[in-house]
Image (cartoon, rainbow, N blue to C red):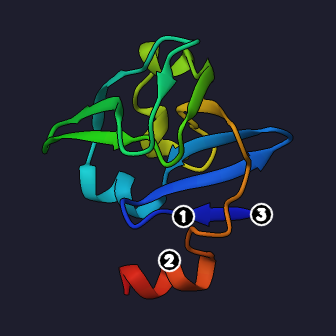
């Protein structure tokens, strides 16, 4: 089950972790992604902390932590191939977080996200 943030991130629960990426809408708005800076594995983040920096031909953007927790993995492929975000944003995840409690009920479901982007 996917959930979404109002900042155009997708979240997927995988056991006791949450996988985080950006939506196709966000990737389209950014344009061609040319650089992705990922956090260190083991970094503790608070909800709202800047975790990832994405640079595209149009702009630079940040991904903020949707929940508090510990970064358990990053998608190292993006360092060498940031364009993977444009080719398939639903597969080009950025990182995994292990929160204290996995509860995505406070985030948007697909219908609510579609209404947000119009």
Mark 1 and mark 2: span between their CA atoms? 6 Å
Mark 1 crowd level (few <14, some 14–19, many ≥20, 10 Å Cα): many
Residue at mark 1: 4
Q: Secondary structure at mark 2?
A: helix
Could you say which quadrant of the image residue 35 lies in? top left
Mark 3 crowd level (few <14, some 14–19, many ≥20, 10 Å Cα): few
Does 104 sit above or below residue 80?
Answer: below
Does 18 sit above or below residue 110?
Answer: above
Which quadrant, please, contains the C terminus?
Answer: bottom left
Mark 2 crowd level (few <14, some 14–19, many ≥20, 10 Å Cα): some
Residue at mark 2: 113
- Left/right placement of residue 45 relative to residue 109 reads left
Mark 1 and mark 3: span between their CA atoms? 10 Å
Pick the front one: 16 or 100 = 100
Residue at mark 3: 1
Earlier sequence position, callout 1 versus callout 2: 1
Residue with the most extreme left position: 58
* Total numbered labels: 3
Determine whether label 1 and label 3 are within 8 Å by CB: no
Q: Residue at x 53, y 84 (%)?
A: 112
Does 117 sit above or below residue 66?
Answer: below
Q: Secondary structure at mark 3?
A: loop
Determine whether label 1 and label 2 are within 8 Å by CB: yes
Q: Residue at x 61, y 52 (%)?
A: 11
Q: Residue at x 16, y 38 (%)?
A: 57
Could you say which quadrant of the image residue 74 lies in? top right
Mark 2 and mark 3: span between their CA atoms? 13 Å
Does 16 sit above or below residue 4?
Answer: above
Measuring from the top left, give residue 27's x and y in whole percent: 37, 52
The label number, if any, that marks residue 83 in the structure image: none
């Amino acid at each position: 089950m996917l959930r979404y943030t109002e900042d155009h991130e997708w979240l997927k629960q995988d056991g006791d972790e949450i996988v985080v990426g950006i939506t196709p809408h966000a990737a389209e708005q950014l344009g061609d992604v040319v650089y992705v800076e990922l956090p260190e594995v083991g970094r503790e983040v608070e909800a709202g902390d800047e975790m990832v920096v994405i640079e595209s031909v149009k702009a630079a953007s940040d991904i903020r932590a949707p929940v508090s927790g510990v970064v358990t993995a990053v998608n190292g492929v993006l360092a060498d191939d940031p364009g993977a975000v444009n080719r398939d944003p639903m597969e080009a995840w950025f990182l995994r977080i292990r929160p204290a409690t996995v509860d995505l009920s406070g985030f948007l479901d697909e219908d609510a996200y579609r209404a947000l982007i119009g």
